[in-house]
Image (cartoon, rainbow, N blue to C red):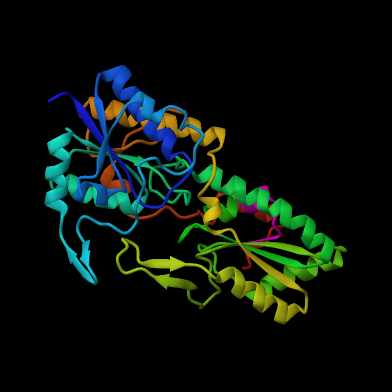
């Protein structure tokens, strides 16, 4: 059989996925003489043998496109694959056999859930290389950021810019909820870049008293409006996460959402100021990747194919502080999430310029 590598995209979509696929295909063909098989819709495509042979023509023009030409899924674990209503089967061995029937290894592009599944399959004998993707930037890959993150927080920062003018015009409190799950990276970066007055993140439980203190401080300065950015995983001290719904078939069944509306409602009651909530939701996932994310995605894609050609399996590609690719063990990347360092430079910087974290 001709040298062939398999690739799939799993979990939520993110700007830059197509750029990674493009880089893998072009590097495989041009540098190593490999063919590339793409499984559609994540691990579901492996179970259902839904695949396509990817050529350079197939990836032409996809660099700036959002989403993924292969499709994705965040509900189809091969270890708990849905086969009927509330019925599941372990298809992991079948997945390994199918992948190895068509390719010598798998490049798995995904976040913590997809990389966790990939690591489990690697332990069962599947040659796997991970490529880190998530807008949440919460993967344990050293100091490197994941592609899709900059595109997401850049959009959120622009949204804050737009809310700023209407908040100032109407003398309102504006609360904007962003994604991030259990990590506050998007809220932190976008909050600093977009001039938020209050940033609420999962790593720092807040009190309404402290938020109101900041609002009152601004009033004394003649500022009759305030901008608050809220990570979906933020919660008050002693409080609980706001859960939108549960998806039992998913790798992570908890769907967070709604804290922005809760905060807005409480602040309006307590301050008497007109307050509005905006939830960016999936707008953060869509659209064209930023130039930096296109570059990062391309570097990760070529590096993943380099590891595949060297048969250096069980690693995730990562970029170090010197802009060099550093392979990180898949077990390490899949061992949990990376959260915001509450004593780190970014949080310190925000505090020094007067941003409140509600604590």
Where in the figure is residue 183, as x and y percent of width and height? 48, 58
- Location of the C terminus by quadrant is bottom right
Q: Magenta span has 137?
A: no
Q: In the picture, residue 199 is in which quadrant?
A: bottom right
In the depicted view, which residue is nearer to us: 92 or 57? Answer: 57
Magenta stretch holds residue 192: yes
Asked if residue 123 lies left or right of residue 279, the reply is left
Q: Is residue 183 above or below residue 289?
A: below
Count of numbered circles in the view: 0
Residue at image position (54%, 70%) is 258
Outermost residue, right side: 222
Span of residues in magenta: 190-199
Q: Nearer the viewer, residue 313 or 172?
A: 172
Where residue 296 appears, x then y in whole percent?
A: 47, 33
**Residue 148, x across and y down, in percent:** 49, 43
The front one of 184 and 96 is 96
Q: Return the x and y of residue 274 as percentages of the image width and height.
A: 76, 74
Residue 13 visible to the viewer:
yes
Q: Is residue 126 visible?
A: no
Residue depicted at 46% across the width and 46% down the height: 14
The answer to whether 262 appears left or right of 327 in the picture is right
């Amino acid at each position: 059989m001709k040298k062939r590598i398999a690739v799939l995209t799993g979990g939520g979509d993110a700007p830059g996925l197509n750029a990674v696929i493009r880089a893998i295909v072009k590097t495989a063909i041009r540098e190593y003489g490999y063919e590339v098989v793409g499984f559609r819709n994540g691990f579901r495509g492996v179970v259902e043998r839904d695949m396509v042979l990817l050529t350079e023509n197939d990836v032409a023009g996809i660099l700036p496109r959002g989403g993924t030409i292969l499709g994705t899924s965040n509900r189809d674990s091969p270890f708990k694959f849905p086969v009927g209503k509330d019925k599941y089967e372990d298809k992991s061995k079948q997945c390994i056999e199918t992948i190895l029937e068509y390719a010598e290894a798998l490049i798995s592009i995904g976040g913590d859930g997809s990389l966790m599944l990939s690591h489990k399959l690697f332990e069962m004998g599947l040659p796997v290389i991970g490529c880190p993707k998530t807008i949440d930037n919460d993967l344990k890959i050293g100091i490197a950021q994941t592609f899709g993150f900059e595109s997401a927080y850049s959009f959120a920062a622009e949204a804050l810019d737009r809310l700023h003018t209407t908040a100032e015009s109407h003398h309102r409190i504006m609360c904007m909820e962003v994604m991030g799950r259990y990590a506050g990276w998007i809220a932190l970066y976008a909050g600093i870049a977009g001039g938020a007055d209050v940033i609420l993140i999962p790593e720092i439980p807040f009190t309404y008293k402290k938020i109101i203190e900041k609002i009152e401080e601004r009033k004394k300065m003649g500022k009759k409006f305030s901008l608050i950015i809220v990570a979906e995983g933020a919660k008050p001290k002693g409080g609980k996460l706001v859960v939108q719904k549960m998806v039992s078939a998913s790798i992570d069944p908890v769907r967070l959402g709604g804290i922005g509306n809760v905060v807005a409602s409480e602040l309006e009651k307590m301050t008497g100021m007109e307050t509005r909530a905006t939830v960016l939701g999936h707008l953060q996932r869509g659209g064209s990747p930023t130039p930096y994310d296109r570059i990062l995605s391309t570097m990760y894609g070529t590096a993943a194919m380099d590891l595949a050609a060297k048969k250096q399996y069980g690693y995730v590609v990562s970029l170090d502080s010197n802009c060099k690719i550093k392979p990180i063990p898949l077990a390490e990347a899949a061992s949990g999430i990376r959260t915001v360092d509450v004593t780190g430079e970014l949080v310190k910087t925000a505090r020094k310029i007067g941003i409140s974290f509600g604590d």
